[in-house]
Image (cartoon, coloured by chain):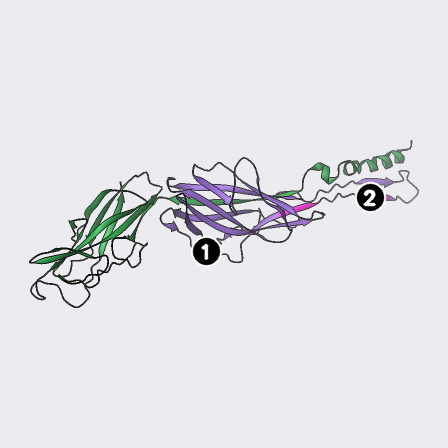
Chain colours: A green, B purple
Amino acid sequence: MKVHDIVRSLRWLALVPALLFPLSARGQLTASGTINATLINRNGIALVFNSDPSGVSLGGGGSSAASLNFGTIAAYGTLSSGVTRTNVGTSSFTVQTFFDIEVTQGGLNSNSYTLSARLAAAAPTGLGYGVDGVTLTTTAQNIQTNGTYNTNVQHSLSLVVSTAAPGAGGPTVGSPLTTTLNFTATSN
Amino acid sequence: MRSSPIRTGSYASLVVTVALLAQGDLKAQSGTATTHLMITAELQSSISLVFNNSPSVGSPGFCPLSNAGTNNVGLDLGAASYTGGDTLSCVNWAQLTGNYYQVSSAFEVVVTAANTNSPSYQLAAEISTAPPANVIWLVNNTTLTNTGFTTLDAADSYGTPVTKTLQVQVRRGVAAQTLSETITFQATAN
């Protein structure tokens, strides 16, 4: 065999792999890609106000900034639905309603919370506010020390109204009296 | 890693075998020498996969990918909690039943093919590591694992963007921590 015949034979050997191993026999056709995803899981605690079946309907219920309207109140006469008059004395009368607070938490090793409340500013003349029997001031006071997470907890809101006349220690008559209460839930 | 028509995904798309063989008469003739160069190439079918931002990127549920348009992207889902939502407005955040919250963001997967008769491809995904207890990583509501690829689609069309939503579900009691995963998507030609 001549040299060039040998070279010609070797030339065709280069095609052997392609003939013997078509694509399908060499594995599936694939492509891949990666996503590097990151989420920072934080802990947190949240408080929302909900209407209580026994109280007045809240404005903005289900949020952390709700409003509660006693409606028109007086020592005598009809009150709004959900408002009761618990005491009529010689110097004051008290009206009361109920509201719910639901506190939730995530990522905390905590089984309960402490609830405190305070007046955002001094109460209007002749009015006093109380939650669950605790008279509120502008300094935070504990209302509850073992609150249960993820459930509505009923609280009473009482408004003590002086029966004194306007200008003589009694509240203003015939115009809305607004007060803001601040509530804070702290995980135990 | 950037993708190009040749460098497609993580798969070598073109394998070329070149045989350079001198052919000709080895006997020298007077004054002339004739040679031939034979070149052989083997073309291989290939497919590629890249991630793209959704046309709705930036709006809620569509966070931007870093390095979009490639097969290796990043996705920042921000910082979230059970009670406080997510710090990024592009993340969809929701409380779920069972005391879980979920964050999610959608993007597009585009698989292209060349030199193949494959009519469609199968798409699957897996996560890189086992997540902490009560943390679930999903794509389009399909839970992913780190023990093997989970099929997402059986027959997607080449060249057509497929929107996929990455979801992370975290139970209320999971301690504060950074949750990271590398999610590998794999397209396999049918």
- Position of residue A151 in the picture relative to residue B20 (left or right): left
Indicate whether A180 appears above or below A28: below
Element type at mark 2 = strand
Considering depth in this image, is A78 or A159 the residue closer to the camera? A78
Amino acid bearing label 1: Pro
Residue B169 visible within the image: yes
Q: Residues at marks 1 and 2, common chain?
A: yes
Q: Residue at x 53, y 52 (%)?
A: B107
Q: Earlier in the sequence, mark 1 or mark 2?
A: 2
Residue B7 visible within the image: no
**Residue B187 within the magenta-colored segment of the rendering:** no
Instruction: Give the number of the disc on residue B177.
Output: none
Question: Where, by quadrant of the figure, is residue A5 drawn?
Answer: top right
- Position of residue A40 in the picture relative to residue B73 (left or right): left
Q: Residue furthest right?
A: B30
Q: Which residues are magenta?
A: B35-48
**Residue B42 within the magenta-colored segment of the rendering:** yes
Q: Residue furthest bottom?
A: A174
Considering depth in this image, is A155 or B2 the residue closer to the camera? A155
Question: Where, by quadrant of the figure, is residue B175 drawn?
Answer: top left
The residue tagged 2 is: B37
The residue tagged 1 is: B60
Amino acid bearing label 2: Leu
The reply to whether dot 1 and dot 2 touch (C-beta < 8 Å) is no
Q: Residues within 10 Å of mark 1 (few under 14, many from 20)?
A: some
